[in-house]
Image (cartoon, rainbow, N blue to C red):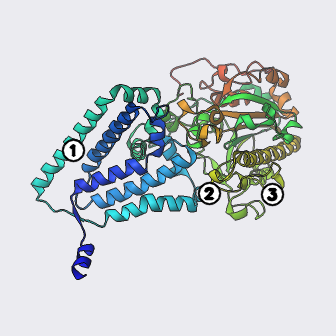
Amino acid sequence: MTGTGAAWRRRPVLSVETLVLLGALFIMVAGNGRFWEAALAGRGWADASTWAFMGAVFVALTALYVAAAATLATRYTVKPLLSILLVTSAATAYYMDRYSIYFDRAMLRNVLATNYAEASELLGWRMVVFVLVLGVLPALLVWWPDVKRRPVRRALAIRLAWIVGALGVATASLLLVFSDFASLMRNHKEVRYLINPGNVVSAFASNAWGRSSRPRGPKVAVGADAQLAAAWQGRTRPALFVLVVGETARAQNFALNGYGRPTNPELARRDIVNLPQVDACGTSTEVSLPCMFSAVGRAHYDEEKILGQESLLHVLARAGFQVVWRDNQSGCKGVCSGLTQQQLNGAGAKATCPDGQCLDEVLVQGLDGVARDAKGNVFVVLHQLGSHGPAYFKRYPPQFRRFTPACESEDLRTCSRDEIVNAYDNSLLYTDHVLGQLIDFLDRAQATHDTAMLYVSDHGESLGESGLYLHGVPYAIAPDVQKRVPLVMWLSPAFRRSFGVDQDCLRRRADLPRSHDNLFHSLLGVLDVRTRAYDGGLDLFAGCRANPQPQAAAAGPVAR
């Protein structure tokens, strides 16, 4: 018994390369279910070619992981390295499996930008169990064996042989199925964002060193020549314009757009203009928010330029508007840098802010003070929490639980699709209520200001269609429900008279295809801000005004 006990307690001795190989094999099996599902879609399990393709790709990716990890692994780093990769791959696999997400650099930025309240809604006991079993436990097992010692020269020679051999095996394996694999990568580029944890490592590298990294230093000026147009000389009252940036509202579930449920009763009773065909600039807040406030837009999308340039808000401020950003979410993503910001989540009364996370009514509360204290023209942005998932049921108070039964769990897989849609529609119903409150406030404020509101969501949402949930799918392959967003305007009679807006004309043009690209130029146009950065061809109000802003002649290059 003593000998047997000693043998059991004796820890095995494994080489660095063997540990790396075992780790790569485990990750390819346990952490890549979504990749294998996508890579083998449409193939029959009875076909020998399916097994040949799967085997060749499995060997190739395992070999590539071995080669990559072997370049960093030593006797001292192999265990921490594998532990990090195992836990990371388990966490990534959970969310890819649970919500059918693709993990690219934009998704990583979403993760890094998530605040505590948002992150806590994505955590649950199922996630903890999943990561413990497929991440933490294997990581602990990595620390059990001892690592074989070798002389430095011999260790380097063996390591080099492993790396070269792994690259050779990967190449040979892919050559066996090159036609099929190349076709998969060419026709379904999104599949690369499912190769775990290579997708995470690639996203980190791209955000840290690639073109997607945030530019350092001051932002490049846009509309440096911005000034109020001559039409302002005839006005005796200041303007109060409120731009509401919605969160995760999709146009398909707006009753104003023909949806079969009354999700917009408040807006339907008011004198609004609804635009049903508006496309977002991105499928996540991290992408859409900077883009929609930029002169660059989606048509000429350049992430580095968008992040490195000033936004619409800076142009308005330069022209003399007092700009205020009021936020009930995770900030303005650099759009309002250097301007007045009011972070309101957690700042309201307990009834408005249960558990420290405020309902969107907090954004409207105190607006009268903003208008009263301002001197001159005011431009206010209200950044909603809106319909941010997966905890849709937390986005509205109990009296707006109209569509039932509603999903009341952060884990959407525990709810039926009908329950998920019910909860989501309730959140839209509450947004409708908040916008109704805002319009009523602006209607009263006509006594002292020319008032107007424009509401537009940053992106849409998937609610289980094709197995997809939430948002953030790469734009090129994203479904319409993640890209089509609602846009609603309310222009007070005082504003329409002062700025010469023909509302009937706007309604006649409402069904034309539009996008976030119109926002920058439309707001400059309707507010009579003259600058060479303005493009009348993208102004929603152009052609519907009695005194449209003339487009300034270009005089040299314009930051766009």
Q: Position of residue 163 (x, y in %)?
A: 21, 44
From mark 1 to mark 3, how far is it between C-alphas? 60 Å
Work out whether mark 1 precedes mark 2 in sequence or the reverse, and give the earlier one.
Answer: 2
Q: Amino acid at mark 1?
A: Ile
Decide: few, some or many residues near mark 2? Use Cα within 10 Å; few <14, some 14-19, many ≥20. some
Label of residue 121 in the image: 2
Above or below: residue 5 compared with residue 332: below
Label of residue 35 in the image: none
In-image side of 367 versus 103 (left or right): right
- Residue 41 visible to an observer of this rendering: yes
In-image side of 175 versus 332 (left or right): left
Under circle 1, the secondary element is helix
Camera-side mark, 1 or 2: 1
Q: Residue at x 70, y 61 (%)?
A: 347
Q: Position of residue 214 (x, y in %)?
A: 46, 42
Decide: few, some or many residues near mark 3? Use Cα within 10 Å; few <14, some 14-19, many ≥20. few
Work out whether mark 2 precedes mark 3 in sequence or the reverse, and give the earlier one.
Answer: 2
- Viewer-nearest residue: 326 or 313: 326
- Residue 470 visible to an observer of this rendering: no
In-image side of 470 versus 362 (left or right): left
Under circle 3, the secondary element is helix
Q: Which residue is mark 3?
A: 398
Q: Position of residue 423 (x, y in %)?
A: 74, 49
Q: Amino acid at mark 2?
A: Glu
Camera-side mark, 1 or 3: 1
Label of residue 163 in the image: 1
Query: In which image quadrant can residue 482 be found?
Result: top right
Looking at this view, name the residue that lies furthest to the front.
Answer: 46
- Viewer-nearest residue: 429 or 24: 24
In contact (CB < 8 Å): disc 2 and disc 3: no
Classify the position of the N terminus by image quarter.
Answer: bottom left
